[in-house]
Amino acid sequence: MARELTQRELRNESGEIMRRLDEGETFVVTRNGVPVAELTPLRRRRFVAAEAAVAMFRSAPSVDYDRFRADLDRVVVQDPEPRG
């Protein structure tokens, strides 16, 4: 859940707020008690070791590529004509 933050707190505590954004926290900025903005981290970095990724893919189910392509063709329009 996002923590509410006043406009004044944003101005006076910007360094601490930036550190907490780096840690993944989200804030709702208010002005006169009314929400006016949401501050969220751009991305959360999650490192997965190559060995762990390879192990996960080894145990993943196989993909039937013909069935996958048929599913895509059924739902995706690939008409080269521009939409109007």
Image (cartoon, rainbow, N blue to C red):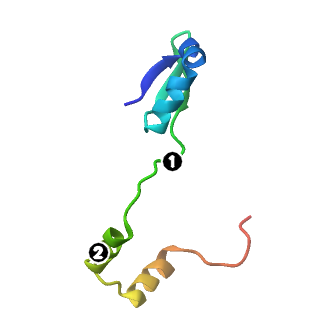
Which mark is first along the chain, 2 or 1?
A: 1
**Furthest residue toward bottom:** 66
Closer-to-camera residue (66/51): 51
Closer-to-camera residue (10/66): 10
Label at residue 52: none
Residue at the image point whose x is 53% and y is 22% from the top: 29
Q: Position of residue 71 (x, y in %)?
A: 43, 80
Position of the C terminus by quadrant:
bottom right
**Furthest residue toward left:** 59
Residue at the image point whose x is 50% and y is 24% from the top: 16
Mark 2: which secondary structure?
helix
Locate residue 59 relative to residue 7 in the image: left or right: left
Mark 1: which secondary structure?
loop
Position of the N terminus by quadrant:
top left
| Residue that carries the numbered disc 1 in the rendered image | 43
In this rendering, is residue 23 above or below 44? above
In this rendering, is residue 16 above or below 57? above
Kind of residue at badge 1: Arg
Q: Position of residue 24 (x, y in %)?
A: 43, 38
Residue at the image point whose x is 46% and y is 47% from the top: 44
| Residue that carries the numbered disc 2 in the rendered image | 55
Q: Residues within 10 Å of mark 2 (few under 14, many from 20)?
A: few
Compute the Cα span from label 1 to label 2: 25 Å
In this rendering, is residue 51 above or below 28? below
In this rendering, is residue 20 above or below 47? above
Q: Position of residue 61 (x, y in %)?
A: 28, 80
Kind of residue at badge 2: Ala
Q: Position of residue 72 (x, y in %)?
A: 48, 78
Q: How many marks?
A: 2
Closer-to-camera residue (6/69): 6
Closer-to-camera residue (5/80): 5
Locate residue 59 relative to residue 32 in the image: left or right: left
